[in-house]
Amino acid sequence: MVGNSLASPLLYLKPSDTVTVALASAALSTSFSNSATSKVTSLAWPPSLSAKKWVVRASDVTVDLSEEQKKTWERCRDALSVFNFSNEEEDKILAKAFGQIHSPYWGEERKKEVPTYEALSETLDYLRSLTLSDEDLCKLLKKFPEVLGCELEDEVKNNVKVLEKDWGIKGKSLRNLLHRNPKVLGYNIDCKGDCMAQCTRCWVRF
């Protein structure tokens, strides 16, 4: 299948899109002449695959920042360095958490923001206090990077209190819950069955 032969980086494409890829001469020497292998080839969406998606992963994240903001952004990346993410992963986590790139979790409500090192560290320290190891946090941030952009006092800490008070969930039980459903840390609404179109942040999902 053509999609499986495309090298990373990848991104979601619509059937109408055209993908431009550079073909490596070593990989294609059996089917192309030496003079053709270094050329850039354009692949259009095959009509027979119109009902399917091609998946291509983005190789980087573009964030438009001033020089001062870039320094702040770099410090925030330093706060994530303990988890051994790549630079690209760190950028993507921060960008999703603070509205620099679109995340379905926020919908249209999240304004672009550049976090501070101090606020980011405070959130990470609090999450560690919930008996989460750095390995746990690494998995949590991959699954739910938006937690870093949630309000620490009004959402994250408040939700932990709700889980303990109303559901008796704390300690090891809380740790297990956060492995399964870390988004509970960002719930900020309870529609009580009367949908308010904010399902990604509603307690009804709990």
Image (cartoon, rainbow, N blue to C red):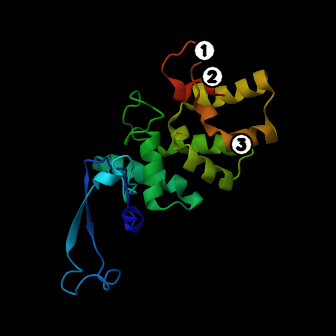
Instruction: Give coordinates of residue 69: x percent, y percent.
Output: 34, 46
Task: Please tell me how crowded label 3 is: few (under 14), some (14-19), or many (20+) other residues with Cα within 10 Å.
Answer: few
**Three-letter amino acid code at disc 3?**
Ser
Q: Are marks 2 and 1 in contact (CB under 8 Å)?
A: yes
Which residue is identified by label 1? 193
Residue 197 position (above or below residue 58): above
Say which label, 3 or 2, has the lower sequence index.
Answer: 3
Residue of label 3: 129
Q: Earlier in the sequence, mark 1 or mark 3?
A: 3
Are discs 3 and 2 less than 8 Å apart at CB? no
Q: Quadrant of residue 56?
A: bottom left
* Amino acid type of the residue that numbered disc 1 sits on in the rendered structure: Gly
Callout 2: SS: helix
Which label lies toward us, 1 or 3?
1
Q: In the image, residue 39 lies at what x, y percent?
A: 20, 75
Q: Secondary structure at mark 1?
A: loop
Nearer to us in this view, 83 or 31: 31
